[in-house]
Image (cartoon, rainbow, N blue to C red):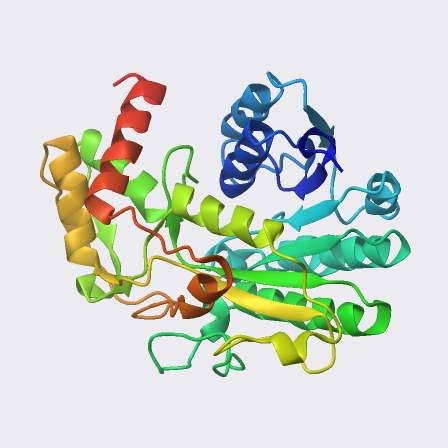
């Protein structure tokens, strides 16, 4: 199979991570079908602009619709894409307190539709997004893929943990080769407006106070989006997990003993204090923030930290973009996009 003939189906293609992944795959010569529902969780115009840029490539085809609509995924999978990357989800820890049903529909029913379609039309490799939030109340740091992830603190985290379990069952029953990713606080250009960096930048430029949770006593494993995409692409290019691969497991591997399934952290592996992150935003903007200190929010955790040794063992890759550089790149994009 030639490089140019490889095909990928990416769900959530108009989302922050989906857009960046599709752009990278197109640059690498893939043909990409992108599915997105254009839901109004945040400004749909941002999603439409991302898709419009992808459509400038002749290798990209956009499909607009909901993952959870019966039959939609089966129709797309019938085209037999080589690789499926499932990024579509209802995101957000805090929003899951307000609208839990949307997480049932998108994250549970939608993922079921995808898995059922993949069982009928198996791709060479199915890769699915999870989240660091699944580690929940596990206080052992850094988080390793083989650690307990049984105490989710938000309904969002619970649905993503359920996705991991659902994918494992389908991998076992149907021989589907599955790689799960656990993402850690991804940021960068074209980011989501509900995320801290976007909100901080907008508020500081508007002369408004920023909301700082847990009185600033937070640490996050901030991961620049280009580093995340590099990790995903390298995992796509790996031989997919195989049912009899346990004998080939590397140190610390998360390969299942019963299915061609593994889970991999993708993070910077360098937790940053929230105060230092805000200082990087202030430096990039050349302005000081007025802080409004607030208590910890329900469903949140004080610290995240990825053990990325498995990613390095499998792919040879370690993220390298630091917070100061990553924040500067975001601010440059924000100012250009919103024409301060």
The count of marks equals 0
Q: Position of residue 300 (x, y in %)?
A: 38, 67
Q: Quadrant of residue 335?
A: top left
Q: Quadrant of residue 209?
A: top left
Task: Pick the quarter of the image with the N terminus.
Answer: top right
Is 1 situated left or right of 301 in this image?
right
Vertical comparison of 294 with 67: above or below: below
The residue located at (39%, 55%) in the rendering is 185
The one of 319 and 219 positioned closer to us in this rendering:
319
Q: Position of residue 187 (x, y in %)?
A: 37, 45
Is 322 situated left or right of 118 in this image?
left
Residue 272 visible in this rendered orientation of the protein: yes
Vertical comparison of 145 with 233: above or below: below
The one of 1 and 308 positioned closer to us in this rendering:
1
Residue 89 visible in this rendered orientation of the protein: no
Q: Position of residue 192 (x, y in %)?
A: 43, 40
The residue located at (76%, 44%) in the rendering is 82
Vertical comparison of 308 with 149: above or below: above
Q: Position of residue 322 (x, y in %)?
A: 24, 48
The residue located at (58%, 70%) in the rendering is 158
The one of 316 and 263 positioned closer to us in this rendering:
316
Task: Pick the quarter of the image with the C terminus.
Answer: top left
Q: Quadrant of residue 330?
A: top left
């Amino acid at each position: 199979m030639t490089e140019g003939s490889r095909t990928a189906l990416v769900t959530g293609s108009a989302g922050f991570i989906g857009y960046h992944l599709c752009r990278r795959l197109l640059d690498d010569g893939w043909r990409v079908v992108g599915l997105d529902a254009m839901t109004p969780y945040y400004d749909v115009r941002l999603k439409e602009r991302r898709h419009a840029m992808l459509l400038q490539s002749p290798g990209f085809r956009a499909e607009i619709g909901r993952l959870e609509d019966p039959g939609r995924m089966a129709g797309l999978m019938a085209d037999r894409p080589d690789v499926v990357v499932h990024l579509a989800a209802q995101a957000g820890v805090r929003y899951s307190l307000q609208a839990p049903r949307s997480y049932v529909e998108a994250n549970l029913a939608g993922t079921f539709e995808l898995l059922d379609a993949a069982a009928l039309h198996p791709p060479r490799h199915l890769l699915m997004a999870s989240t660091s939030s699944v580690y929940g109340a596990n206080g052992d740091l850094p988080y390793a893929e083989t650690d307990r992830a049984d105490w989710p603190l938000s309904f969002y985290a619970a649905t993503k943990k359920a996705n991991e379990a659902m994918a494992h069952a389908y991998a076992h029953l149907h021989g589907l080769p599955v790689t799960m990713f656990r993402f850690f606080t991804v940021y960068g250009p074209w980011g989501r407006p509900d995320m801290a960096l976007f909100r901080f930048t907008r508020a500081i430029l508007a002369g408004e106070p920023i909301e700082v949770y847990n009185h600033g006593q937070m640490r996050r494993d901030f991961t620049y989006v280009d580093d995340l995409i590099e990790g995903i692409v390298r995992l796509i290019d790996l031989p997919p997990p195989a049912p009899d691969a346990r004998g080939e497991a590397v140190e610390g591997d998360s390969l299942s003993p019963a299915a061609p399934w593994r889970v991999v952290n993708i993070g910077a592996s360098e937790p940053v204090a929230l105060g230092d992150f805000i200082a990087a935003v202030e430096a990039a903007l050349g302005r000081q923030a007025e802080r409004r200190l607030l208590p910890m929010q329900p469903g949140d955790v004080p610290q995240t930290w990825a053990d990325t040794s498995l990613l390095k063992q499998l792919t040879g890759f370690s993220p390298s973009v630091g917070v100061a550089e990553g924040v500067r790149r975001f601010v440059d994009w924000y100012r250009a996009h919103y024409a301060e």
